[in-house]
Amino acid sequence: MNKMTLNLGPQHPSTHGVLRLILELEGEKVISCEPDIGYLHRGMEKIAESRSYIQYLPMVDRVDYLCGFFYSYAFCNAVEHLNHIEVPQYANYIRVMMMELNRIASHLLWLGTYLLDLGAISPMFYTFRERESILDYFEKITGQRMMYNYFVFGGVRHNILYFDDVLNIVNNILFKINEYENLITDNPIFLSRTKGVGVISKTKALDWGLTGPNLRASGILNDYRMNMEIYDDIEFDIVLSNEGDCYSRYIVRIYEMRESVFIIKQCIDWLKSNKVIPDPVKFSHNEYQKGEIYSFVEAPRGLTLCYLNSVGETTPYRLKWRTGSFYSTQILRDILKGVSLADIMAIYGSLDVVLPEVDR
Amino acid sequence: MNFLLCKFIELLKNFNIPDSIGILLFLPLPFFVIISFLIITVIFLVLFERKLLGYFTQRKGPNRVGVWGILQTTADAIKLLCKENIELLSADKFLFTLSPLVAFSAIIILWCIIPYNSEFNMINSSVGILIYLIVSSFPMLFHFLAGYSSNNKYSIIGSYRALALTASYSVPVIFIILSIVCITRTMNLNKIVLFQTSYWLIFSNFLGFIIFYISSIAKLNRCPFDLSEAESELVCGYHTEYSGMRFAMFFLGEYAELFVMCMLISILFFGGYLPPFGIYLSNILSGNCSLCRYLIYFEQTFWLIFKTLIIIFSIIWVRATLPRLTQKKVLELFWKYLTPLSIVNLIIIILMRI
Amino acid sequence: MNCIDMIKMNFPDIRIDLNKVETDYQLYEILEYLKGTYELSFDILLTIIAVDYTDYVELIYPLLSTYLNEQVNISTKVKNEAKSVTSIYPGAYFDECEIYDLFGISFTGNKKLKRLFMPSSWIGHPLRKNYELKDTRLSWNE
């Protein structure tokens, strides 16, 4: 049989951005796959070297526009550790609450677009409806819907929070998640598309550097929130699934959203009972310390690392982003071998890749 | 048809035009009626689907052009017809241009086979259902040729998928139609409708209806069987390279096919143009006046379209709910389950009719 | 026993910095040891960080152990060439390509090195400190 080379992308309805997959096909069967990235490369790391910390702060949200809070947090945390800035507990709880809301928004977007990849059109509109409520809340608090620029070194920009709004939003989402599950989880077509498709074994997942929900769906207990200081006083379960197929990645994310709601409620309880308005942090931007900081955060798409190397100048000497999607894209080289063309999108979609995060 | 012909000749006699010219003039008339009906229906069908999908997904659908967006698809169609035709240099120009034309005209022929009421049936053949089967395989064949000739990898994959699908859904369709022919003992669509005066065929052939319904969704290339134009995988399948007028032919043809297929379902299983309880509303309303006879025809057409729209509604509902199947699963569904079931269904019906 | 102590015991030549382990020539062996030893099993190579110090480039390998839930950073200094670790961690492939692309360091043992982000015809390696930013291709010509 003749081999055919198919260029999937960079402009393609379901590559979620501009990813090019160079596929070698035999009929509908994929012989090899080579992801070609870099179409969204904005040089985030190079830009950091020519901008002061404060100037770079608004840019970090743009590394991944779907979960900007996590990147803001990673960067702020790095700078705070570098300069030994104390963050008030109150601000930490606000940060956790915002990040978890952001995680729900990100997972909701993934859920909708994943089902769209599988050919179901309605769930996208339903999940966007709920995501909209979260974005509206973000807009109310931060003035922005996607690029928040809300976390600052030493805390958060404002602490005017509408707790009842958040409670309404998360309670509604908890109810709607059940609705999505009624529509999707037991649907025989959905099951046939996802069960046993794109299986990533434990060793494969580790070897290729998968993190986050994708790793937990392969049955490996690893959640960096366990190690993060700001999650110390918060109770939450880590969602695990053992099969490593698309269905487990789906179910892990569904249950993670529920866990996030649980975390948000704890934060609100704490914030409501500790109504202290902390003083704004005094922090001179001229005295930067030397040092290397590794700042980790568990983002919706995997473990995110912000490596900050400072030599005492006003600009970072080197800044490096480690993002989850970069490795989720890379694993396509391995797991797409031998699958059929129709399953490519089912597998690729289930990994929740966001291209700006890959290219940075 | 004869009744309409007589009326037409009588009308012309008032203007002193001889019979022979009247007959000649009458020949193309039903065709023009059908064509205009087709175009109007298709344009509003597209709007109907978009509106419905909008409401299914918490949106309003088109609501800017005209009142309630009623002119949206008209505007879209005009835009498509005015657009430039783009074709690849490496495409097979003859087939590339021919395919949409033939596919669309085959669908027009399908519309001519349908009995819209007890008088208006342009091709009233004794083997009407056979003609339908044969002609309805044309669009799929030319979809394949369209994909083949456009020299695009997505298109060719879509075409292969379409071919594989054609082979699988045709078999159950034929067996179900055979079972209907066994019950009604005729292949004439008009007679099949009239057979259902006392009861609809869905009651005596329910399993057949289910299989036929699923197969016709596959035949129409609609979700969850829209593998050959799976947007998330193949961009647009066989019509990826088409634009402008040629694309409009495929696009409108798809909806025309949807409507005519649903008309066929309502004719085969829901009594076609017969009213639901055998009572014509116009009979009750207008008593026994001479106008009543004409009103009945319109009422029959109304019932046919009404039933058709309900079936279309259900198909759109399916589209709004289900994800897409993979080719492997589709072939499995048709060859492992629906084909044997349809054969069993046929055997049972034959045994009952002996 | 602390994992850094264990590394120190097996590889006495290393230097231990505040939050990283520095090695001059034993990087490959250390990574092999860290992944292969059951009590440690540092099974995820998170990324490879390259820092250009003009006269040399430092490569930092942050590792994560899902077994211990610990994190350790191994670093080494290279000039223009380094040994590929794709045979231990296949996931290092994209990272090595990225460093090859942005820093111009070639990895021996990685046969499919390619420019990952920049076009293949791009001249220079952007994240190097001596990279000329006044490239005409970077300015917007209107």
Image (cartoon, coloured by chain):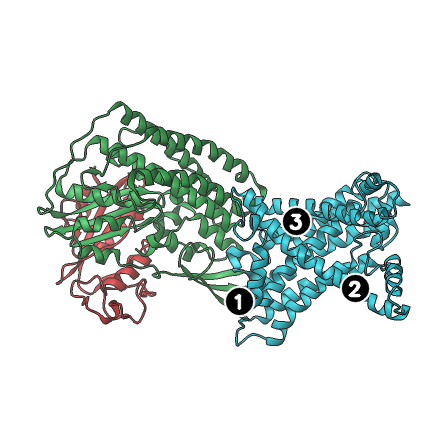
In the depicted view, which residue is nearer to us: A118 or A223? A118
* Residue indicated by mark 1: B153
Q: Nearer the viewer, mark 3 or mark 2?
A: 2
As displayed, is residue C29 above or below residue B149?
above
Q: What amino acid is labelled 3 in the image?
A: Leu
Q: Is residue A243 left or right of residue B262?
A: left
* Residue indicated by mark 2: B29
What residue lies at 83% left-to-right and 41% top-to-bottom? B286
Q: State which tag comes first along the sequence, 3 or 2.
A: 2
Chain B appears what colour? cyan
**Image quadrant for the N terminus of chain C?**
top left
Secondary structure, mark 1, is helix
Do marks 3 and 2 share a subunit?
Answer: yes
User: Which chain is red in the picture?
Assistant: C
Q: Chain of mark 3?
A: B
Q: Is residue C79 left or right of residue B195?
A: left
> Real-space Cα distance between discs 1 and 2?
43 Å
Q: State which tag comes first along the sequence, 1 or 2.
A: 2
Using the rendered view, name the quadrant where residue C134 is placed. Answer: bottom left
